[in-house]
Amino acid sequence: MGIANDRFGSLTMGRQYDSVVEYIQPLSGIPYTGLAHPFDNDNLDNSFRVNNSVKYTSPNFGGLKFGGMYAFSNTATTDNGSGFATNRLWSLGTSYTQGRLSVGAAYMHLNAPNANTTGAVAGDYINVTTTSPLHAAGLTGAVIRQDVAAAGVTYQLSPVTLGFVYSHSKFYSTSDSLRLDNYAATASWQITPAFFLSSNYTYTDGRAHNADLKPRYHQAELIADYFLSKRTDVYLLGAWQHAVGDAPVASIAPDTYGTGGTSAPDASTTRNQVLVRLAMRHKF
């Protein structure tokens, strides 16, 4: 719920999308659930939404928009003040569109997301297990902090749109830290007003610092999408991921952070994984 004004923007409260999703996902070529960077390490595939949040979104200033979010921990403060920071989140983002060019940037910070289930991020947030690719890549223990920075650009060469997104995710546990840098190039071809093809290639470069491991991933996708109406479409999706370096297994499609995508059964048992999906969507 919230209030909105054409001159001053909008202020909303409740369960909402963070700034990385709001400002970078439209540029990323990831409009399909389950098609993410490895185990959706930057949340561009909406693995979680944010509870207890207050979000401001500016009006459109000649193509420029910006906004920010703060999500409360729902935990009473302690004598040293740490309780107020338990499972909280904040994020900032901006975008600019002028003619055929669109650019965006965003930042998100999560603090102690595993500490409770009633704060900004609900559920078991990347509680790293022995079957997790994060664990095998060198990260042990539950995530106690995460930072995500992302930027993207698209340019329309009608009927083709080209894009590039970079995102940097860093996970901190009680014993180590893991950095993942995603470099994604996209291209889509609007063949007819109702039918288009889209492709995406992502290279993910990782580093687990204390373990001195360097997990890396190659991922390629191809999508054919046909719109039956403005709100209903059918699509065929194919994705392939190859894990290299110190990455032990491939893991394309997350279900929820901490279960699907980061552990069996969604992760592969080998360094290769293929995802094929035929689906129909209706948007409400």
Image (tube, rainbow, N blue to C red):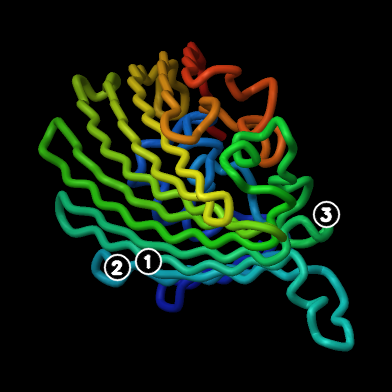
Marks 1, 2: nearer the viewer? 1
Total marks shown come to 3
Badge 1 is on which residue? 94
Does the image show residue 92? Answer: yes
**Which of the two residues, 7 or 187, is positioned nearer the viewer here?**
187
Instruction: Please tell me which residue is depicted at 46% across the width and 72% down the height of the picture.
Output: 9
Q: Local crowd at mark 3 within 10 Å, few (<14), some, or many (≥20)?
A: some
Q: In the image, is 200 to the left or to the right of 59?
A: left
User: In which quadrant will I find the C terminus?
Assistant: top right
Badge 3 is on which residue? 117
Q: In the image, is 238 to the left or to the right of 265?
A: left
Tag 1 and tag 3, C-beta contact below 8 Å? no
Which of marks 3 and 1 precedes in the sequence?
A: 1
Badge 2 is on which residue? 64
Tag 1 and tag 2, C-beta contact below 8 Å? yes
Q: Callout 3, which amino acid?
A: Thr
Q: Callout 2, which amino acid?
A: Leu
Q: Quadrant of residue 115?
A: bottom right
Marks 1, 3: nearer the viewer? 3
User: In which quadrant will I find the N terminus?
Assistant: bottom right
Residue 136: percent from left, percent from top:
62, 36
Q: Local crowd at mark 2 within 10 Å, few (<14), some, or many (≥20)?
A: some
Give the Cα separation between the discs numbered 1 and 2.
Answer: 7 Å
Give the Cα separation between the discs numbered 1 and 3.
Answer: 29 Å
Instruction: Please tell me which residue is depicted at 43% across the width and 61% down the height of the picture.
Output: 149
Residue 116: percent from left, percent from top:
83, 58
